[in-house]
Amino acid sequence: MKRAIITVIGKDMKGIIAKVSTLLADNNINIMDITQTTMQDMFTMIMLCDITDMDTEFSALAESLEVLGNSLGLSIRIQHEDIFNSMHRI
Amino acid sequence: MISSGEIIETIKMISEENLDIRTITMGISLLDCAAETTKESCNRIYEKITRYAHRLVKTGEDIEREFGIPIINKRISVTPISLVIQSCKDVDCVRFAETLDRAAGEVGVNFIGGFSSLVHKGYTKGDHMLIDSIPYALSATKLVCSSVNVASTKAGINMDAVLQMGHIIKKTAALTKESGGIGCAKLVVFANAVEDNPFMAGAFHGTGEGECVINVGVSGPGAVKSALESVKGQEFGVVAETLKKTAFKVTRMGQLVAQEASKRLGVPFGIVDLSLAPTPAVGDSVAYILEEMGLEKCGAHGTTAALALLNDAVKKGGIMASSYVGGLSGAFIPVSEDAGMIEAVSCGALSIEKLEAMTCVCSVGLDMIAVAGDTPAETIAGIIADEAAIGVVNSKTTAVRIIPAPDKKVGDLIEFGGLLGSAPVIAVGGYSSKGFVTRGGRIPAPMHSLKN
């Protein structure tokens, strides 16, 4: 299974989860876990996704998330889970 | 699942603290490109580099995108060219340099290293030809980097080469006068050069290396400084621990990228170089880390001790994070490429003597230092000899990358632009080294080189 982590950081507003998850569903991506916190006065949402069956290129998905983020005034990024595992787990 | 705090920490290190992979460097052996004519040899070199490295930049960009970690440079290092030209009957070294330049341009890397020669014990025919051509090669090309190893702990210091390099550096500056002597920024004089260094300008693919290899250099002075800010005023045990933890995380990322690049390119993974490499960007400075430890300015008394602690902790933290550590692995202190160093030199806090002392405890040496254009070649040779002695006696790599900036005086500033930054012209000693450096011959290897 290939897993990626999507982080949404910015000012809280209505419909963030709806918009991000619609985009993911449209690309055949399954959301496995969502956490949401307010850290350092910032809204932070973290999604763990299964991208094994996604029907788009990783770079194209990253770009559409970025575009969506820009339209909402949020920073949305997607990264392979491995980068966090390698940095924080031995 | 990884916790939110950990995820945010990683993202903050990348987006706010300039954490990045400084370079993915592909080492390529050119030993099989030797031929009887320059034309044939250059054809083979061009064909081999473009065949091996055509996917390097694209692969680097893909990894960058998917892992969300910037990879600043994609580069190539090759077998020292002095070894490849030896069998040519009509050697034209500049043409070899131009071929490297063209191949590098074709595959889209931003530097190619290996226009190099290893003369720590003596010159071969090819070494003479290559070294003589360095000023012309560096002025005729944009992406080619050159290095010459003039000393080693096992062989001692080749003083003929030290003196010659003084002259070569002056000539390179003169031939690249229009751009502030920028040719010299692409020329390193080494003692104990390493074969798997991924960083420029000193990278070359050593003869002990395989056919092709991927080496990765990590960076992250900003992340280290930020970690130290959280332990302000605490004792050194805490400082060292904090440095080690940050270095571990930074290196793990380097290891991940190195393995991924190696897998995707189908090329063996060589080493991760655990270096703290600054850039001119504010917040990406090694000098600021030293200042964060409590020094008013980098260069104040205590700077060498602070750097020794930093250098050691980076290695200790990084060593467990990577399966193979190599290259230079230590903190870099290039003056022009570090905002804090530039400030320290400009305000008079940091002198060349202090920089020399600092090179005893870190990698690599007197790096990206601008001196007045009228500095005699013999004085530059004296500076190289001192730095080589530090390397030889301490069994470490040292290097000199010095720019005698044409028509500039002490206090002037030269702009190189990009990652090379800008350098304030620093004062050097006014007394002559001529009688010493012109004696010729070789300074014997030190006692402790006899380990067998």
Image (cartoon, rainbow, N blue to C red):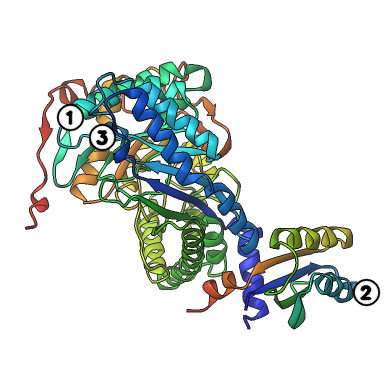
Q: Nearer the viewer, residue B50 or B150?
A: B50
Residue B371 sits above or below residue B193 on the image = above
Q: Does mark 1 fall on the same chain as mark 3?
A: yes
Q: Report if residue B421 is visible in the image.
A: no
The residue pinned by badge 3 equals: B83
Q: CA distance from mark 1 to mark 2?
A: 73 Å
Eye-nearest disc, 2 or 3 = 3
Sequence-first tag of 3 and 1: 3
The residue pinned by badge 2 equals: A14
Q: Report if residue B199 is visible in the image.
A: yes
Q: Does mark 2 fall on the same chain as mark 1?
A: no
Residue B357 lies, in percent from the top left, at: 31, 45
Q: Residue at x 52, y 41 (%)?
A: B109
Q: In the image as oriented, which residue stretches furthest toward the right?
A: A14
Amino acid type at mark 2: Lys
Q: Chain of mark 2?
A: A
Q: Secondary structure at mark 2?
A: loop
Q: Alpha-carbon neighbours of circle 1 within 10 Å: few (<14), some, or many (≥20)?
A: some
Q: Quadrant of residue A20?
A: bottom right
Q: Which mark is residue B66?
A: none
Amino acid type at mark 3: Leu
Q: Alpha-carbon neighbours of circle 2 within 10 Å: few (<14), some, or many (≥20)?
A: few
Q: Nearer the viewer, residue B165 or B384?
A: B165
Q: Chain of mark 1?
A: B
The residue pinned by badge 1 equals: B123
Q: Nearer the viewer, residue B191 or B45?
A: B45
Quarter of the C terminus of chain B within the rendering: bottom left
Q: Are marks 3 and 1 in contact (CB under 8 Å)?
A: no
Q: Does mark 3 fall on the same chain as mark 2?
A: no
Q: Secondary structure at mark 1?
A: loop
Q: Alpha-carbon neighbours of circle 3 within 10 Å: few (<14), some, or many (≥20)?
A: many
Amino acid type at mark 1: Tyr
